[in-house]
Image: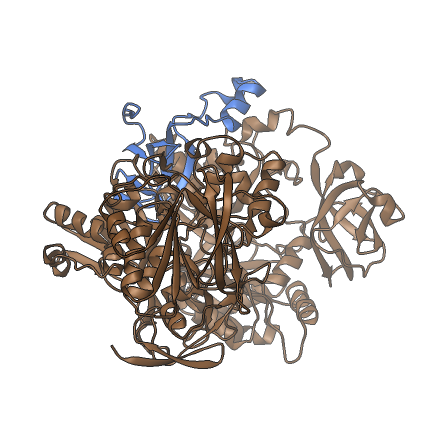
Amino acid sequence: MLLINCPWCGPRDETEFHYGSEAHIAYPEKPEELNDEQWAEYIFIRNNPKGWYAERWVHTASCRRWFNVWRNTINHEFGPSYKPFTKQPSRPK
Amino acid sequence: MSTVQFSFDGVTYHGNKGEPLSAALLRNDIKVVTESSYLFRPRGVFGLGYEEPNALVQIVSGSGEPMVPATKIELVEGLVVKSLAGVGDLPISPDKARYDKTFKHVDLLIVGAGEAGLLALKKEYKKNKSIIILDDKPNVGGYKNELNEKIPQELLKNLSTDNVIQLQRTTAIGLYDQNYVVAVERRSDHLSSEIIPNFARMRTWHIRAKKIILATGAFQRLIVFPNNDRPGIMLSHAAATYLDKYRVGTFTNCVVFTVDDSGYKDALRIQDTGTNVKAIIDIRQKVSGPLVDQVKKKGIQIITGSCVTNTNSDASGAISSLFVTKSDLKGNINGETNEIICDLLAISGGWTPTVHLATYLNIKPIWNQNTASFNLTKLPKNIEAVGYVKGDFDKSTNPPAVFFGLIPEGEDAKVSFVDLQRDANIRDLRRAVGAGLTSIEHVKRYTTIGTDHDQGKTSGTTTIGLLAQLINKAPGEVGTLTFRPPYIGVPFSALAGRDLGILSDPIRTTSLHNLHLNAKAPMEDVGQWKRPWYFPLEKENMHDAVIRECRAARNDVAAMDASTLGKIDIQGPDAGIFLDRIYTNMFSTLKVGSSRYGLMCGVDGMVFDDGVTTRIAEDRFLMTTTTGGAAKVLDWLEEWLQTEWPELDVYCTSVTEHWSTVAIVGPKARALMAKLSPDLDVSNEAFPFMENRYANVANIPARIARISFSGELAYEINVEAWFGSHIWQEVFSQGKEFGITAYGTETMHVLRAEKGFVIVGQETDGTQTPMDLDMDWIVSKKKDFIGKRSFARTDTSRTDRHQLVGLLPVHNQDLLPEGSYVTKDEETIEDSVSKHIGYVTSSYYSDALARTFALSLVVNGKSLIGKFVSIPVGDKIIKAEIVNSVLFDKENRRRDG
Ligand SMILES: [Zn+2]
């Protein structure tokens, strides 16, 4: 079970959270101007890197806040957590 | 030391309290403990701890437990066990013992309280405020303790301090991400063979540690040669410990077969107990040093550069003699063969570090040719390894040989065992290689080596070594097996703790629950909710009850508990704009006091949830969601508010449990409503459909909503949950004259399906657009909302999508099973195969229609209305006509009364 650092509450067990997939995928400003391929890119296509990945979690069973966090997909090591609309910390080494 | 009585396979024996059952069995001359799982060969005690592959027993006394190694059972008065051949029986009666769990966060966790663990504790003690040190044996000291060596006092003094929790008889069974360890403590089996009331038999520890030190030690491993599995063939450290520490006697003539200096140490220990060590057979060509000198001084013969090539047995199957021949390190036998009579063959095949916990985290142990072992030398930060598990073995003069055994062919291959528990042998290994397998993971699955309760503790490295030899690689190139938790067999009851029965999963009930129970309504599980399914009268079956309930709702008045619907209070000046973006239809234009049915979709345009939302005030809405979807919807709302539209001033709160909702439904609902709430003008003009009024109902302040999920005139009475029971009881006492009838979820389903109202999750599975559900009317053309762009995708505008339609079986009493395939109009099952064009989502008998009907998703269904389809059910075809999904009161004449 992962230990996830909620930027509001601190480290908590994974069971309190829900996963929110890749971070920094913004809702397109004018969806109607996108072609099917661009829209499909937004809906369906996510990166799946081996290594550091910026992803979203929501602290459902507590503060109910969404946040972003760096996680290493190889060994589940966590980098810094950060609140939405704050500066993204640099990719951990 | 006191003597206790125990029973093995129905015979009573005596042994010393607290010693391992395996020691007591040996002392009672029980060399053959069981048969092997597959080949039924006699097998005896082989090891000393959890590495034991042979001597499994079923505990019959106390809680009972299948498949426990006899080496890990501490002898206690009245213990009853029976032997078993690899397959245990789960006790049939419920376990009366108590199990507990506990959670700890500590600075440091040390796994293993052998010498290495104790040294680590001494070193780390001052640096850490909270420490757990756990160990799976009754006492600290590990290997040294088994050697009867005294542990220095300075290593023990920190154990009994306030900031150290010392757990004995506790096994770490799993290591997970972020230093999370699950350990199981056995608390009472050594105290009593009976269940001790009000005392946890086992306790599961969930530990998060800032730092973990693995001091898990090592197990000795076997050596492969023909007939290496006979009772009386044991690991040398186990044999020496049984004879020396537990004084089991038993054996007269011993031969040690070794690849390292441990064999010499154990030979000396065995010789000192009075058992005659006739020879040490060493695969190494040359050995020297003090241990060797001591052995020579004792007159023990040393046969170097040689290998055991076979064994004989007595009538019981136990070893009676062995054969020894010159051999090189590749197992090439050369020269004359000599027989040595013996009843104990002590095997020292080298040490295998207990790396299991680390491999759960995908940490790869590294091969070291000098120690002939895979060691934990590369670890992530915050995990350390010390002692044997790291490859730091006791100093020895002669390095161990990298030798795992013989790889014979023919009949000998079948009796040369690699994994004793699995009866897997050299023939299996040769076959795997012959089949082209070179990966140890593939070989493991092909041969089952390393997969049983012992997870190949004595066989893992041996398998790797022999495979390497067969495919001409080095052991380090083959790599290690990936183990999986749990490290030992653990009863589910230990993991469950007290979360049993009613505590196993949360149950949600409405404030009316006890009234429903009193009415003897069977309950249906809807998510965690318990909802009354139907309300049978005496001896009435479900079918008859549902017909009666439907009839009451359509002809008179009926009431249901609608409290489980999810309710979200949405407040803020931008609440209207927010809902416009969330729902496919408009909400910002909704008048205060009015309600509207809304549909929400994912960004992919697929229906996600639905419900009626009411504008309570200019800046406040009360959203209802499906019973099962409430939490998911709240997450969804928060996601958009927090991550996309932080500029919107909107706040959401779950209020599901705050309100009780009683729906009164049917032509006589208006009369009943007027009676319940004399001050309220219930006329259709004063209180139209989809509006809300505040009034006292049976003297309780309530919000009344004209909402209908049945097509009938209906009022939903919402009161604070405290008053739910009162309102329900008043509805029934005052409704008596109108024939008030309670109805449950089944009738609710029939009524809504007759009207073609969908249930999200029943008519939908995440691949339906509103248009697929014939709900084009709810999709706004004026505004953007989540999912809108997807309706213009080529995929969502396909004409051959599954569309919601009704089905009327040609024989009007045929009930289509929900989930059935709908196929093209064919006459036989054979013809219908592979011609499915849809499936049945809901199917009921309708009293109002006096026939059966169904809802269904059918490819291009709307264009097929009037056509016939076949539904294969069992070996029959049921024919049905495709019709519009609304089957009752298409003009909505009934909803206003
Ligand atoms: Zn939080």
User: What quarter of the picture does the C terminus of chain B occupy?
Assistant: bottom right
> According to the colouring, which chain is brown?
B
Residue A66 sits above or below residue B508 on the image: above
Quadrant of the rendered image containing residue B592:
top left
- Describe residue B169's horizontal placement relative to residue B230 as left or right: left
Residue B797 rendering spot, x and y as whole percentages: 66, 28
Residue B63 rendering spot, x and y as whole percentages: 42, 74
Q: What's the colour of chain A in the image? A: blue
Residue B138 sits above or below residue B154 on the image: below
> Which residue sits at x=57%, y=19%?
A37
> Which residue sits at x=73%, y=42%?
B838
Q: Nearer the viewer, residue B669 or B117?
A: B117
Residue B718 rendering spot, x and y as whole percentages: 45, 60
Q: Nearer the viewer, residue B677 or B637?
A: B637
Residue B615 rendering spot, x and y as whole percentages: 43, 45
Q: Nearer the viewer, residue B859 or B36?
A: B36
Tell me if I can see residue B414 in this picture.
Answer: yes
User: What quarter of the picture does the N terminus of chain B occupy?
Assistant: bottom left
- Describe residue B874's horizontal placement relative to residue B152 as left or right: right
Q: How many marks?
A: 0
Tell me if I can see residue B561 in this picture.
Answer: no
Residue B40 sits above or below residue B223 on the image: below
